[in-house]
Amino acid sequence: MSKNQISATAFADTKPHYNILDGLRGVAALTVVCFHVFEAYATSHLDQKINHGYLAVDFFFILSGFVMGYAYDDRWKTMTVVDFIKRRFIRLHPMVVIGAIIGASIFYFQGCAAWDVSKVSVSRLLIATCINACLIPATPGFEIRGVGEMYPLNGPSWSLFYEYIGNILYAIFLCKLPTKALSLVVLLAGFGLAVFAIWGPYGDICVGFSLTEDNILGGSLRLLFSFPAGLLLSRIVKPIHVKGAFWIGSLSIVSLSAIPRIGGSEHLWMNGLYDTICVAIIFPLLVYVGASGKTTDKTTTKLCKFLGDISYPLYMVHYPFIYWYYAWVKNENLTFEQSLPGALALVIGSILLAYVCLKIYDEPVRKFLTKRLLRVKTSSY
């Protein structure tokens, strides 16, 4: 079992993380950024490039459940639910706040025909910023962008809303379930997710970001299968030696994300079946492969650590610039080739910003909160 150098993702935990899984999380975060860049040129999910990039969220949920089980399942005799929630708050919430602030700071640069930011008053923007920073979903009256997002300043915050729900469910319910009962939860949730994906209204599971009935149902099913599935995997997995696990996992994530839409508008069920296979079979297998591998050279080890370090900050800071990029492309009526320099600047700039936020904001804030809320010396972490 590979437990290499501790990355920044493990800051609030005493156990080291699996180095390769940290690296795969970073690869998945990069696919999300690329998926969002191509939203500027898509007319719907049918012609979106990096078409299945949204599945990275399900990979994140599975990975989160796996890590929760590995890191905390054996601590409940000495750890309270309140202490656990504090740890997760310290780990997750600083980047939620900075993502909202970044989104607010460039909001008025994002005007286009799809959303008229000039009509939003400063007072409404401030209220929206506070709501987003507190991870409170925006109801229609407070959704200042006008496209129905739960978090209009930083869209990806929706998955953190569900991540918190998953963590709470784990603390009060899932951690107490015997393995057989947990398996039944995974089976039932997986059946529900498959039904939604294959026979649902969209032919995919790119849902969860809005407060509509379909999004709430789909987002809940994504969490209720993937998080417990990762937890179950942490209990039953017996890692074997897999050579080249990071490169196998990385290539698989990128390839699965880049597959074009399957079946078109005539056969939505085909794409739903693809989503189901990825989430229910391939992603758990990739987590197993990542947990079974071990980095054997300094370059791969450093790469995995870097990708793991920036994965969560990158996910949480890039999207405000996607809004800006989208507005620029639409306002100037640009093709992808014409806007390629801007796309490259966005991706590279987001990576750099994520690293800066990690070092000068996220890590120091987590140190401060760890000392104040957990009453421990930060040097022990």
Image: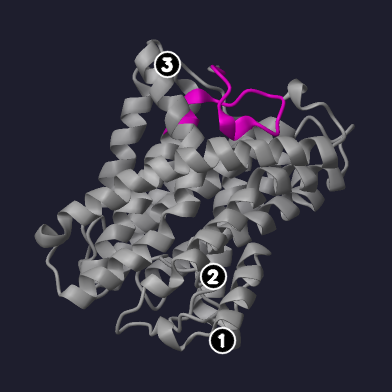
Sequence-wise first label, 2 or 1: 1
Q: CA distance from mark 3 to mark 2?
A: 38 Å
129 and 51: which is toward the camera: 129
108 and 163: which is toward the camera: 108
Q: Are marks 3 and 2 in contact (CB under 8 Å)?
A: no
**Could you tell me residue 209's position as x and y percent?**
50, 69
Q: Residues within 10 Å of mark 3 (few under 14, many from 20)?
A: many
Question: Is residue 317 something one can see in this rendering?
Answer: yes
Is residue 346 placed above or below 272 in the rendered structure? above
Q: Amino acid at mark 2?
A: Tyr
Q: Secondary structure at mark 2?
A: loop
Sequence-wise first label, 3 or 1: 1
Residue located beneath label 3 in the image: 295
| Mark carried by residue 151 | 2
Q: Are marks 2 and 1 in contact (CB under 8 Å)?
A: no
Residue located beneath label 1 in the image: 140
Q: Is residue 295 left or right of residue 217?
A: left
Q: Amino acid at mark 3?
A: Thr
Is residue 273 placed above or below 235 in the rendered structure? below
Q: Is residue 276 magenta?
A: no
Q: Is residue 369 left or right of residue 361?
A: right
- Residue lying at the far front in this picture: please name it: 122
Which residues are drawn in magenta?
3-23
Q: Is residue 16 magenta?
A: yes
Q: Residues within 10 Å of mark 1 (few under 14, many from 20)?
A: some
Q: Mark 3 or mark 1, which is nearer to you?
A: 1
- Number of residue marks: 3
Q: Secondary structure at mark 1?
A: helix
Q: Is residue 126 left or right of residue 300?
A: right
Q: CA distance from mark 2 to mark 1?
A: 11 Å
Q: Which residue sits at x=61%, y=43%?
A: 65
